Amino acid sequence: MTAAIIVFPGSNCDRDTAVALEAASGRAPRLIWHRETALPKVDLIVIPGGFAYGDYLRAGAIAAHSPIMREVVARAHAGVPTLGICNGFQVLTETGLLPGVLTRNASLRFVCRDVHLRVEQTDSVFTCKYRPDQVLRIPVAHMDGNYIADDTTLQELEDHGQIALRYCDADGAATAEANPNGAQRNIAGLFNRRRNVLGLMPHPERAADPHHGGTDGRALFAGLVEMIAA
Amino acid sequence: MSNAAPRPNDLMGLSEPEYDTILEIMGRPPNLTELGIFSVMWSEHCSYKSSRRWLKTLPTEGPQVICGPGENAGVVDIGDGEAVIFKIESHNHPSFIEPYQGAATGVGGIMRDVFTMGARPVANLNALRFGSPDHPKTRHLVRGVVAGIGGYGNCIGVPTVAGEVNFDPAYNGNILVNAMTVGIAPADRIFYSAAAGVGLPVVYVGSKTGRDGIHGATMASAEFGGDAAEKRPTVQVGDPFTEKLLLEACLELMATDAIVAIQDMGAAGLTSSSVEMASKGNVGIELDLDRVPLRETGMTPYEIMLSESQERMLMVLKPGHEPAAMAIFEKWELDCAVIGETVDHGRLILRTAGSIAADIPVPPLVAAAPEYDRPWTATPPRPVLTAAEVPQQPDLGPALCRLMACPDLASRRWIWEQYDHMVMADTVQRPGGDAGVVRVHGSEKGLAVTTDCTPRYVHANPIEGGRQAVAEAWRNLTAVGATPLAITNNLNFGNPERPEIMGQLVGAIQGISEACLALDCPVVSGNVSLYNETEGSAILPTPVIGAVGLLPDLAVTTSLAFAANQAIVLIGKTAGWLGCSLYVRESCPGETMAPPPVDLAAERRNGDFVRGLIADRQVTACHDLADGGLLVAVAEMALAADIGATITLPGDLPAHAWLFGEDQARYLVTTANPADLLAAAIQAGIPARRIGHTGGASLTVSGTAPISLADLSAAHEGWLPAYMATA
């Protein structure tokens, strides 16, 4: 599998994601500077976490207009698996590849901790290695993870199986207490209709090595490698 | 000669004799810009004039030390061609005036000190002291400082992995915000500040210079009066996004061969960075101020030279490398300009609009900086408190819950969950344990990091308190299995012109020196923050120790979390020292007596023994004993794993002295093989005693009612969120 990681000024999880991808695939991903206008032929595009353009104006808003993003959007529309983690999720909503918007956490504070996630949809290149309703423990670290969409959109997301992950407690119940940021319907991760684009607030690359204290994120990368090779 | 010339009304914080020295150096009265430059360079903050004489007595050498104090940060060898670079620095005054920006720019400043030397920052820490929780300003300050530290560190993408917080009324009018950064660099690619060579281009890169932070270093060198709020314009404003760009651009340029010298513009901005580089390189420097990138029009030379705008670097390049450097800065969208060159006449010359705005000989500007031997009086010894004088709490459970929920012991989760402590994906031990542990990227080695100080001990006895701060930091590294390498210190004190305050500083430095020698842990960098007083009331003396240790193999480390069904063994001697303990402070307010003595030889023996046990994989958990004593340590270990314990009481000490005494040089370890461990202790001559075992959902002290972990956890985790949620 060949992967491209898009690097904006202010991205700060590009290296972490590259490490996790290389561990899963045996191949170092290409780091693509945001000013590029063309993408090499790749099997996967990743928009990593961080603070692209310092989150100025609005998280992800400026990055969505970087030169490279025109090509990213075109590839995603053409079916190339595209993954946005944390700030990457915010960028994907700003480009319109994913519906809705990620607003300031309900607590108004940055939150960095392990959360539990319930796998809602396993029929995708990203989640194929998980079991339905499997409970994962993966860290979040963000200021703006409070997912909001209108009721029609939310219903469509439910109807089309586009909700990938929900915040839940250790037993899999999607409670308000288990929701770290106030996201509607405890949404932690979201697909486009075709399920080749995934945005998620948690950081699977920070749960990919025994030293991280958990490895529940690993199967996401392993699944991608397997599906893309197949 | 010039003594006859009229003196300026405002000497900018300089004393009359200091002004006389300037007249001698200059041979004429300095103009406003020149006086400003002398004023910041000779401020307490930049010149260490009250402390230098004593700082010289600190041990700074060791086979592991690549570069000790005097550069931007200390450099220590960690093997395999790599070095760890670290330093701690205060941003106390600005944080009190404007907590978010003050704390944020404190983090930004210390990170620049570390990446200026060629290191990629890999861990941030912070040591915070706030006033009484009852004080009307405290909540606002906690909220702002924590948000500021998080806002900066999170954005730049360096994990904040450890730290400490105390509350005490002595900090009501003067909080302490000490930030530490640890970075890693190739050992043969360390960058220094000496601009050796003449005719070399001086390059400015980073944010534009504005009117913020002008004379910040001078403000940081004076007491607060009632006018603190009026000093807000001297506080700098941070932009972590620009710092991230600056970090990446500098590291990219450092991978080439272009840089001769580099210095960040921190306190005293363009002044201290240019003077420092010229002085260390034995050259002069000429700057054309018209080329400095400015944020606003009409800035005077005085303002340009004294601005403390953030996220700026000054570097001296090899001739001909400017285009390559500019290309890198352009890629990262940073302002940059060649603003001058090094010259052979040994003077700092500033030009603007074709005329000379300042002309100062560099050597005396640096070498003639005042150094004072301020009068000092030793802190009088306090009486020893015996256990018999301290009333026993009738009920152990409530007493322990009260301690675990007291502001100095309550969980700091509300704070560290606002810090990204996992970015870089190398965090192995998260906040909440004895030390943060980060992996050396791409290896199986780890760095353990901690900051420590117990100000109430230092206040009661500066020498013992200084020793204890080092010993506790050393113990915290040991408790995760790391070999301590070196320390950095942040000496926060009151007004050194008062002999009793100066005595605290002298005593603490003596204690730190003794401990560093006994524990083979030299001081490689540091910062002094004096005049921490408001309207004549000084803070508790707070010499914070930041320490870094090496874990050769991350597979051989331990944490404080209990495993089930293990024997609990106490290492070290327990005399039941209650003087200055939290137990006494929380149960009989106002009682302050002699703090626990620190037996440095015992610290060394016990710590080396514990580290050996960890290396031999004989222990399943380890925790050092500190604030609150034995029972608090047991409770912390239990809560970290949600596994209870049963503890026996010895016959030879009163229960409260045994359970809550704060004797030093002690650790709790758990093991599946207590017999082997105790035999090894006897063999090594180390006091060790089996005190109980782990398991269950409560904490039981023999002969008393079980204390449920749920209750303990609610008390421990509840205090800070509840406090911060109150309006």
Image: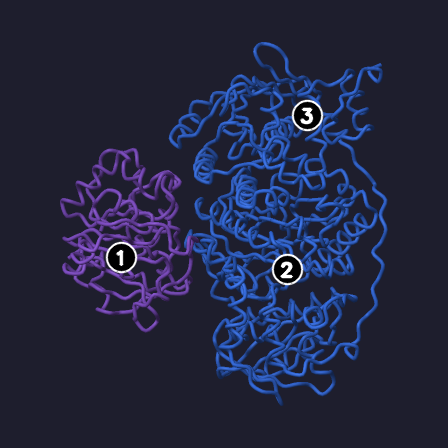
x then y, percent, for residue B248: 44, 38
Location of residue B480 with respect to B509 vertically, above or below: below
Q: Give the chain letter at badge 2.
A: B
Quadrant housing residue B289:
top right
Q: What residue lies at 68% left-to-right and 38% top-to-bottom? A: B45
Q: Give the chain letter at badge 3.
A: B
Which chain does the blue colour mark? B
The kind of residue tagged 2 is Ala
Q: CA distance from mark 3 to mark 1?
A: 56 Å
Tell me the SS state at disc 3: helix
Q: Give the chain letter at badge 1.
A: A
Asked if both marks, 3 and 1, belong to the same chain, the answer given is no
Q: CA distance from mark 1 to mark 2?
A: 41 Å
Which chain does the purple colour mark? A
Please tell me how crowded label 3 is: few (under 14), some (14-19), or many (20+) other residues with Cα within 10 Å: many
Residue B473 numbered mark, or none: 2
Please tell me how crowded label 2 is: few (under 14), some (14-19), or many (20+) other residues with Cα within 10 Å: many
Q: Which residue is mark 1?
A: A189
Tell me the SS state at disc 2: helix
Give the mark toward the camera: 3 or 2.
Answer: 3
x then y, percent, for residue B379: 83, 56
Q: Which residue is mark 3?
A: B36
The kind of residue tagged 1 is Gly
- Colouring rule applied to residues: by chain
